[in-house]
Image (tube, rainbow, N blue to C red):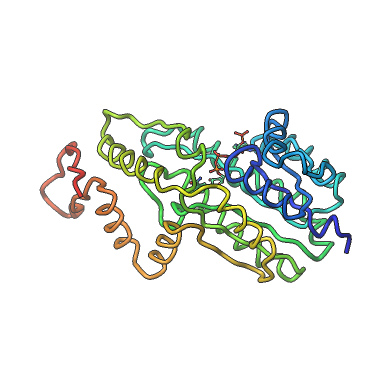
Amino acid sequence: MDETRSRSVVITGASRGLGLATATHLHRQGWTVLAAMRTPDAGLPRLKENLGPAHDPNRLIGVRLDLEDPDSIEAATAQILDAVGVPYGLVHNAGLAGAGAVEEMPVQVVEQMFTTNLFGPIRLTQGLLPGMRAAGRGRVVVVSSHVATSGMGAVSAYAASKSALERWAESLSMEIAPFGLGVSVLVTGTFKTDILELTQSWKDATGPYAALHAALESMGDKMVRFARRPGRFAPVVQRALQDTKPFSRHAVGPDAVAMVYGNRVLPTRWVQFLTTRLLGLPRPQSTPSPMSSTPPPASSPPQPTGP
Ligand SMILES: NC(=O)c1ccc[n+]([C@@H]2O[C@H](COP(=O)([O-])OP(=O)(O)OC[C@H]3O[C@@H](n4cnc5c(N)ncnc54)[C@H](OP(=O)(O)O)[C@@H]3O)[C@@H](O)[C@H]2O)c1
Protein backbone atom coordinates (compact mmCIF):
# COMPACT_ATOMS: atom_id res chain seq x y z
CA MET A 1 0.00 0.00 0.00
CA ASP A 2 1.11 3.56 -0.71
CA GLU A 3 2.92 4.76 2.45
CA THR A 4 1.47 8.31 2.22
CA ARG A 5 -2.06 6.94 2.21
CA SER A 6 -1.43 4.46 5.00
CA ARG A 7 -0.45 7.30 7.35
CA SER A 8 -2.56 10.21 6.13
CA VAL A 9 -5.31 11.58 8.31
CA VAL A 10 -7.93 14.30 8.01
CA ILE A 11 -8.58 16.12 11.28
CA THR A 12 -11.48 18.56 11.42
CA GLY A 13 -11.36 21.52 13.80
CA ALA A 14 -7.55 21.50 13.73
CA SER A 15 -7.36 25.24 14.39
CA ARG A 16 -7.71 25.09 18.19
CA GLY A 17 -8.10 22.93 21.26
CA LEU A 18 -8.17 19.16 20.94
CA GLY A 19 -7.92 19.27 17.13
CA LEU A 20 -4.80 21.44 17.20
CA ALA A 21 -3.17 19.18 19.81
CA THR A 22 -4.09 16.07 17.80
CA ALA A 23 -2.78 17.49 14.51
CA THR A 24 0.48 18.45 16.25
CA HIS A 25 0.91 15.03 17.85
CA LEU A 26 0.09 13.01 14.75
CA HIS A 27 2.43 15.07 12.59
CA ARG A 28 5.24 14.51 15.08
CA GLN A 29 4.46 10.79 14.97
CA GLY A 30 5.05 10.76 11.21
CA TRP A 31 1.51 11.07 9.90
CA THR A 32 0.64 13.18 6.88
CA VAL A 33 -1.86 15.59 8.43
CA LEU A 34 -4.68 17.19 6.48
CA ALA A 35 -5.57 19.92 8.96
CA ALA A 36 -9.15 20.96 8.18
CA MET A 37 -10.26 24.29 9.59
CA ARG A 38 -12.58 27.21 8.86
CA THR A 39 -9.77 29.75 8.65
CA PRO A 40 -6.44 28.20 7.61
CA ASP A 41 -4.93 31.69 7.32
CA ALA A 42 -5.11 31.96 11.12
CA GLY A 43 -5.07 28.30 12.15
CA LEU A 44 -2.25 26.92 10.01
CA PRO A 45 0.41 29.36 11.33
CA ARG A 46 -0.71 28.38 14.86
CA LEU A 47 -0.22 24.71 14.02
CA LYS A 48 3.20 25.37 12.42
CA GLU A 49 4.25 27.37 15.47
CA ASN A 50 3.23 24.46 17.69
CA LEU A 51 5.28 22.07 15.57
CA GLY A 52 8.38 24.26 15.46
CA PRO A 53 10.86 24.64 12.60
CA ALA A 54 11.54 20.90 12.37
CA HIS A 55 8.14 20.11 10.86
CA ASP A 56 7.88 18.57 7.41
CA PRO A 57 5.85 20.88 5.11
CA ASN A 58 5.21 17.94 2.74
CA ARG A 59 3.25 16.19 5.50
CA LEU A 60 1.19 19.19 6.57
CA ILE A 61 -1.69 20.29 4.38
CA GLY A 62 -4.17 22.99 5.38
CA VAL A 63 -7.72 22.39 4.18
CA ARG A 64 -10.43 25.06 4.31
CA LEU A 65 -13.59 23.48 5.74
CA ASP A 66 -16.76 24.95 7.15
CA LEU A 67 -19.08 22.13 8.22
CA GLU A 68 -22.08 24.45 7.97
CA ASP A 69 -21.48 25.02 4.26
CA PRO A 70 -22.09 22.10 1.83
CA ASP A 71 -20.04 23.83 -0.92
CA SER A 72 -17.11 24.14 1.48
CA ILE A 73 -17.37 20.44 2.35
CA GLU A 74 -17.41 19.52 -1.34
CA ALA A 75 -14.36 21.71 -2.05
CA ALA A 76 -12.51 20.30 0.98
CA THR A 77 -13.24 16.74 -0.15
CA ALA A 78 -11.84 17.51 -3.61
CA GLN A 79 -8.73 19.11 -2.10
CA ILE A 80 -8.12 16.12 0.20
CA LEU A 81 -8.50 13.58 -2.63
CA ASP A 82 -6.24 15.66 -4.83
CA ALA A 83 -3.57 15.97 -2.13
CA VAL A 84 -3.26 12.37 -0.90
CA GLY A 85 -5.46 10.25 -3.13
CA VAL A 86 -7.47 8.64 -0.36
CA PRO A 87 -6.73 9.30 3.31
CA TYR A 88 -6.35 6.46 5.80
CA GLY A 89 -8.00 8.21 8.73
CA LEU A 90 -10.85 10.68 9.19
CA VAL A 91 -11.15 12.29 12.61
CA HIS A 92 -14.45 14.10 13.17
CA ASN A 93 -13.22 16.40 15.91
CA ALA A 94 -14.78 19.81 15.10
CA GLY A 95 -17.72 20.55 17.30
CA LEU A 96 -20.05 23.25 18.52
CA ALA A 97 -21.54 23.48 22.00
CA GLY A 98 -24.11 25.86 23.44
CA ALA A 99 -25.73 26.34 26.83
CA GLY A 100 -29.34 27.10 27.68
CA ALA A 101 -32.49 25.31 28.77
CA VAL A 102 -34.77 23.86 26.08
CA GLU A 103 -37.12 26.84 26.54
CA GLU A 104 -34.30 29.36 26.24
CA MET A 105 -32.29 28.20 23.24
CA PRO A 106 -33.50 29.35 19.78
CA VAL A 107 -34.21 26.42 17.47
CA GLN A 108 -31.83 27.91 14.87
CA VAL A 109 -29.00 27.37 17.34
CA VAL A 110 -30.10 23.77 17.86
CA GLU A 111 -30.04 23.31 14.08
CA GLN A 112 -26.58 24.90 13.86
CA MET A 113 -25.29 22.45 16.47
CA PHE A 114 -26.74 19.46 14.62
CA THR A 115 -25.28 20.74 11.32
CA THR A 116 -21.79 21.14 12.80
CA ASN A 117 -21.78 18.03 14.98
CA LEU A 118 -23.71 15.60 12.77
CA PHE A 119 -24.86 16.64 9.28
CA GLY A 120 -21.53 18.22 8.28
CA PRO A 121 -19.52 15.15 9.38
CA ILE A 122 -21.99 12.93 7.48
CA ARG A 123 -21.48 14.96 4.28
CA LEU A 124 -17.69 14.86 4.64
CA THR A 125 -17.77 11.10 5.25
CA GLN A 126 -19.96 10.58 2.19
CA GLY A 127 -17.35 12.43 0.10
CA LEU A 128 -14.37 10.41 1.35
CA LEU A 129 -15.86 7.00 2.03
CA PRO A 130 -16.10 5.65 -1.55
CA GLY A 131 -12.31 5.91 -1.94
CA MET A 132 -11.62 4.55 1.55
CA ARG A 133 -13.97 1.62 0.94
CA ALA A 134 -12.35 0.84 -2.41
CA ALA A 135 -8.93 0.94 -0.74
CA GLY A 136 -10.20 -1.60 1.80
CA ARG A 137 -8.41 0.02 4.74
CA GLY A 138 -9.04 3.01 6.94
CA ARG A 139 -10.66 4.30 10.09
CA VAL A 140 -13.23 6.91 11.05
CA VAL A 141 -12.86 8.39 14.54
CA VAL A 142 -15.65 10.49 16.05
CA VAL A 143 -15.18 12.77 19.04
CA SER A 144 -18.23 12.54 21.27
CA SER A 145 -18.81 13.83 24.78
CA HIS A 146 -19.50 12.38 28.22
CA VAL A 147 -22.70 14.48 28.35
CA ALA A 148 -24.01 12.33 25.49
CA THR A 149 -24.08 9.24 27.69
CA SER A 150 -27.36 10.13 29.41
CA GLY A 151 -28.14 13.80 28.71
CA MET A 152 -27.66 16.84 30.93
CA GLY A 153 -29.78 19.85 31.73
CA ALA A 154 -28.91 23.11 29.92
CA VAL A 155 -26.98 21.33 27.14
CA SER A 156 -29.77 19.28 25.59
CA ALA A 157 -29.02 20.14 21.95
CA TYR A 158 -25.31 19.46 22.32
CA ALA A 159 -25.97 16.17 24.16
CA ALA A 160 -28.57 15.14 21.57
CA SER A 161 -26.32 15.94 18.60
CA LYS A 162 -23.41 13.99 20.09
CA SER A 163 -25.68 11.04 20.97
CA ALA A 164 -26.92 11.04 17.39
CA LEU A 165 -23.31 11.15 16.17
CA GLU A 166 -22.54 8.06 18.28
CA ARG A 167 -25.56 6.10 16.96
CA TRP A 168 -24.56 7.15 13.43
CA ALA A 169 -20.97 5.95 14.02
CA GLU A 170 -22.19 2.58 15.36
CA SER A 171 -24.41 2.13 12.29
CA LEU A 172 -21.63 3.19 9.93
CA SER A 173 -19.32 0.64 11.48
CA MET A 174 -21.74 -2.19 10.68
CA GLU A 175 -21.88 -1.05 7.05
CA ILE A 176 -18.15 -0.64 6.42
CA ALA A 177 -16.61 -3.38 8.59
CA PRO A 178 -17.10 -5.97 5.79
CA PHE A 179 -14.86 -3.79 3.60
CA GLY A 180 -12.04 -3.77 6.17
CA LEU A 181 -12.78 -0.32 7.62
CA GLY A 182 -13.22 0.49 11.31
CA VAL A 183 -14.89 3.12 13.45
CA SER A 184 -13.93 4.43 16.90
CA VAL A 185 -15.95 6.64 19.22
CA LEU A 186 -14.09 8.73 21.78
CA VAL A 187 -16.39 9.63 24.66
CA THR A 188 -14.48 12.68 25.81
CA GLY A 189 -14.37 14.07 29.34
CA THR A 190 -13.33 17.57 30.38
CA PHE A 191 -10.26 19.06 28.68
CA LYS A 192 -9.02 22.59 29.04
CA THR A 193 -9.95 24.23 25.75
CA ASP A 194 -11.97 27.25 24.63
CA ILE A 195 -15.14 25.15 24.75
CA LEU A 196 -15.16 25.45 28.55
CA GLU A 197 -14.94 29.24 28.61
CA LEU A 198 -16.19 30.54 25.25
CA THR A 199 -19.26 28.37 24.68
CA GLN A 200 -22.18 30.63 23.79
CA SER A 201 -24.99 30.76 26.28
CA TRP A 202 -28.68 31.59 26.04
CA LYS A 203 -29.35 31.12 29.72
CA ASP A 204 -31.52 33.63 31.52
CA ALA A 205 -29.87 34.17 34.91
CA THR A 206 -33.13 35.46 36.43
CA GLY A 207 -35.56 33.13 34.64
CA PRO A 208 -37.20 29.90 35.80
CA TYR A 209 -34.01 27.90 35.21
CA ALA A 210 -31.80 30.28 37.22
CA ALA A 211 -31.13 27.71 39.96
CA LEU A 212 -30.09 25.08 37.40
CA HIS A 213 -27.72 27.52 35.70
CA ALA A 214 -26.23 28.70 38.99
CA ALA A 215 -25.50 25.12 40.10
CA LEU A 216 -23.97 24.17 36.75
CA GLU A 217 -21.89 27.34 36.65
CA SER A 218 -20.45 26.65 40.08
CA MET A 219 -19.67 23.05 39.06
CA GLY A 220 -18.20 24.33 35.74
CA ASP A 221 -15.78 26.60 37.62
CA LYS A 222 -14.53 23.59 39.60
CA MET A 223 -14.24 21.43 36.49
CA VAL A 224 -12.10 24.02 34.70
CA ARG A 225 -9.58 23.65 37.52
CA PHE A 226 -9.46 19.86 37.09
CA ALA A 227 -9.65 19.84 33.29
CA ARG A 228 -6.85 17.95 31.56
CA ARG A 229 -4.42 19.35 29.00
CA PRO A 230 -5.37 18.81 25.32
CA GLY A 231 -1.96 17.15 24.83
CA ARG A 232 -3.25 14.18 26.85
CA PHE A 233 -6.09 13.66 24.38
CA ALA A 234 -3.98 13.44 21.22
CA PRO A 235 -2.30 10.04 21.88
CA VAL A 236 -5.75 8.53 22.43
CA VAL A 237 -6.74 9.60 18.91
CA GLN A 238 -3.61 7.96 17.56
CA ARG A 239 -4.42 4.71 19.38
CA ALA A 240 -7.98 4.88 18.01
CA LEU A 241 -6.62 5.32 14.46
CA GLN A 242 -4.37 2.29 14.93
CA ASP A 243 -7.12 0.14 16.41
CA THR A 244 -7.88 -2.97 14.36
CA LYS A 245 -11.32 -3.83 15.78
CA PRO A 246 -14.32 -3.08 13.52
CA PHE A 247 -15.78 -0.87 16.27
CA SER A 248 -14.43 0.52 19.50
CA ARG A 249 -15.54 3.04 22.08
CA HIS A 250 -13.15 4.64 24.57
CA ALA A 251 -13.92 6.89 27.48
CA VAL A 252 -11.22 9.59 27.64
CA GLY A 253 -10.60 11.04 31.10
CA PRO A 254 -11.87 10.04 34.55
CA ASP A 255 -15.21 11.90 34.32
CA ALA A 256 -15.96 10.20 31.00
CA VAL A 257 -15.04 6.79 32.45
CA ALA A 258 -17.41 7.41 35.40
CA MET A 259 -20.26 8.44 33.08
CA VAL A 260 -19.83 5.57 30.62
CA TYR A 261 -19.59 2.85 33.27
CA GLY A 262 -22.20 4.48 35.54
CA ASN A 263 -24.70 4.48 32.67
CA ARG A 264 -23.84 0.89 31.83
CA VAL A 265 -24.77 -0.42 35.28
CA LEU A 266 -27.38 2.04 36.57
CA PRO A 267 -30.87 2.87 35.30
CA THR A 268 -31.26 6.44 33.99
CA ARG A 269 -33.31 7.61 36.99
CA TRP A 270 -30.42 6.57 39.28
CA VAL A 271 -27.89 8.37 37.12
CA GLN A 272 -30.11 11.47 37.25
CA PHE A 273 -30.56 11.14 41.02
CA LEU A 274 -26.81 10.90 41.61
CA THR A 275 -25.98 13.68 39.14
CA THR A 276 -28.55 15.95 40.80
CA ARG A 277 -27.08 15.31 44.27
CA LEU A 278 -23.43 15.50 43.21
CA LEU A 279 -23.82 18.71 41.19
CA GLY A 280 -26.29 20.33 43.59
CA LEU A 281 -28.92 20.68 40.86
CA PRO A 282 -32.52 21.68 41.74
CA ARG A 283 -34.30 18.61 43.18
CA PRO A 284 -37.24 17.16 41.21
CA GLN A 285 -40.76 17.41 42.61
CA SER A 286 -42.89 14.31 42.44
CA THR A 287 -44.95 14.38 39.25
CA PRO A 288 -48.67 14.65 40.02
CA SER A 289 -50.77 11.83 38.61
CA PRO A 290 -52.90 12.82 35.59
CA MET A 291 -55.88 11.41 37.56
CA SER A 292 -55.16 13.62 40.58
CA SER A 293 -57.96 16.04 41.49
CA THR A 294 -55.51 18.63 42.89
CA PRO A 295 -54.04 20.69 40.02
CA PRO A 296 -50.30 21.36 40.21
CA PRO A 297 -49.27 24.93 41.13
CA ALA A 298 -49.11 27.31 38.13
CA SER A 299 -45.43 27.91 38.70
CA SER A 300 -43.06 26.47 41.23
CA PRO A 301 -40.25 28.37 42.95
CA PRO A 302 -36.65 27.32 42.22
CA GLN A 303 -35.48 24.51 44.45
CA PRO A 304 -32.49 24.91 46.77
CA THR A 305 -29.18 23.81 45.25
CA GLY A 306 -27.45 22.64 48.42
CA PRO A 307 -25.19 19.58 48.49
N1 LIG B 1 -12.87 20.18 25.70
C1 LIG B 1 -13.77 19.45 26.30
O1 LIG B 1 -13.90 19.47 27.54
C2 LIG B 1 -14.65 18.52 25.48
C3 LIG B 1 -15.46 17.59 26.16
C4 LIG B 1 -16.25 16.72 25.44
C5 LIG B 1 -16.22 16.75 24.05
N2 LIG B 1 -15.46 17.67 23.40
C6 LIG B 1 -15.49 17.67 21.93
O2 LIG B 1 -14.17 17.73 21.43
C7 LIG B 1 -14.16 18.34 20.15
C8 LIG B 1 -13.11 19.44 20.13
O3 LIG B 1 -13.52 20.45 21.03
P1 LIG B 1 -12.52 21.46 21.74
O4 LIG B 1 -12.63 21.23 23.19
O5 LIG B 1 -11.19 21.44 21.09
O6 LIG B 1 -13.32 22.81 21.43
P2 LIG B 1 -12.86 24.20 20.80
O7 LIG B 1 -11.55 24.63 21.35
O8 LIG B 1 -14.05 25.08 20.95
O9 LIG B 1 -12.65 23.86 19.25
C9 LIG B 1 -13.73 23.58 18.41
C10 LIG B 1 -13.19 23.36 17.02
O10 LIG B 1 -14.29 23.08 16.14
C11 LIG B 1 -14.19 23.96 15.02
N3 LIG B 1 -15.49 24.27 14.43
C12 LIG B 1 -16.59 24.79 15.04
N4 LIG B 1 -17.57 25.00 14.14
C13 LIG B 1 -17.07 24.57 12.94
C14 LIG B 1 -17.60 24.53 11.63
N5 LIG B 1 -18.83 24.98 11.32
N6 LIG B 1 -16.82 24.05 10.64
C15 LIG B 1 -15.57 23.59 10.90
N7 LIG B 1 -15.01 23.62 12.11
C16 LIG B 1 -15.75 24.11 13.12
C17 LIG B 1 -13.54 25.22 15.58
O11 LIG B 1 -13.02 25.98 14.51
P3 LIG B 1 -12.81 27.59 14.61
O12 LIG B 1 -11.45 27.79 15.21
O13 LIG B 1 -12.92 28.05 13.20
O14 LIG B 1 -13.91 28.14 15.48
C18 LIG B 1 -12.48 24.59 16.47
O15 LIG B 1 -11.36 24.18 15.72
C19 LIG B 1 -15.59 18.85 19.92
O16 LIG B 1 -16.28 17.96 19.09
C20 LIG B 1 -16.19 18.87 21.31
O17 LIG B 1 -17.58 18.73 21.27
C21 LIG B 1 -14.67 18.56 24.08
Residue 19 or residue 148, whichever sits in front: 19
Residue 207: % across, % down: 27, 30
- 79 lies left or right of 199: right
Kindly indicate the quadrant of the structure image that contains residue 259: bottom left
245 vs 78, left or right, is: left
Q: Quadrant of the N terminus?
A: bottom right
Residue 226 pos. (x, y %): 40, 48
Query: As rendered, which of 268 and 15 lies closer to the eye?
Result: 15
Which residue is found at the position 27% from the left and 34% from the top? 210
Q: In this image, 120 relative to 34: left or right?
A: left
**In this view, which residue lies farthest toward the left?**
294
Task: Please determine whether, in this image, residue 245 is positioned above or below residue 222.
Answer: below
What residue is shown at x 67% (from left), y 69% (from top)? 246
| Spot occupied by residue 307 in the image (x, y as percentages of width and height) | 20, 50
Q: Quadrant of ligand 1?
A: top right
Q: For this view, does 97 lie left or right of residue 293?
A: right
Instruction: From this view, report whether residue 164 is shown above or below residue 16.
Output: below
**171 up-or-down from 214: above or below:** below
Q: Position of residue 248 (x, y in %)?
A: 60, 67
Q: Quadrant of residue 117?
A: top right
